[in-house]
Structures are given as structure tokens and as C-alpha cells.
Image (spheres, rainbow, N blue to C red):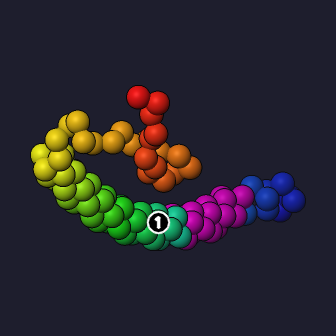
Amino acid sequence: MFKGEEKSELKPFISEVMYKEMKAELHEHRYYLEQKVEQRTERLLKRIASLEACNATLCDKLATAQRELAKLRQAVPDDQMMPLHVVDGKWNEHLSAA
């Protein structure tokens, strides 16, 4: 046999072996990526649940504060209320020249 004939006979075998190896490698990569996607999805779902719980708590606190403020406004006549404003993140009485 010639050298060229040996190569041509081995070529399909080598290609088939390489194909199987590449297919197995791709399968491993796919599995790894699927696991990563599941882990990240799980973490994101936990974060979403936590943020939704925080949002619900803040909404409840805001609603309570609004109700309390409405009660205070009803209890105090408008001419006795002092205007307020925020300075450096804190509520302060506004001293007007009037």
C-alpha cells in the first residue's frame, strides 16, 4: 500500500473520533452553562423576592405616614401650621419674614 492510501483509510476514522470528542466536549460545556444559568436565575429570583418585600414594607410605611399627616392636618387649622422645608435631608421649620 501507498502512504496516501493509508491516510485516506484513517481519515474517516480520525474524523469520527474527533467528532465524538468534540460532541462530548460540547455536551459538557452545555451542561456547565445550564448549571450556571440555573444558579444565576435562582439568585435573581431571591433578590427579586427580597426587593418586592422591601418595596411592600416601604409602601406600608409611606401609607401610614400619609394617614398620620392627614390626621395632623385635620387637627391643626391652616393658619396655625408653619411651613416646613428640607435642609440637608432633615425637616426644619421655615422662618418667613411675614
Dominant secondary-structure state across the stretch colored magenta: helix
Foreground of the two, 16 or 34: 34
- Is any part of residue 38 visible from this angle? no
Q: Residue furthest front?
A: 98
Foreground of the two, 89 or 20: 89
Q: Residue at x 51, y 51 (%)?
A: 89
- Quarter placement of the N terminus: bottom right
In the figure, 93 relative to 9: above or below?
above
Kind of residue at disc 1: Arg
Foreground of the two, 81 or 3: 81
Q: Residue furthest right?
A: 3
Q: Residue furthest top?
A: 98
In the figure, 40 relative to 87: above or below?
below
Q: Residue at x 39, y 43 (%)?
A: 84
Which residue in the structure is indicated by mark 1?
40
Q: Is residue 16 magenta?
A: yes
What span is in magenta? 11-31
Figure quadrant of residue 12: bottom right
In the figure, 91 relative to 7: above or below?
above
Say what secondary structure mark 1 lies in. Answer: helix
Figure quadrant of residue 9: bottom right
Q: Residue at x 52, y 64 (%)?
A: 33
Left or right, residue 38 beside residue 1: left
Q: Characterize the local packing of mark 1: few (<14), some (14-19) or many (20 or more) Cα atoms within 10 angstroms.
A: few
Q: Residue at x 46, y 49 (%)?
A: 92
- Is any part of residue 53 visible from this angle? yes
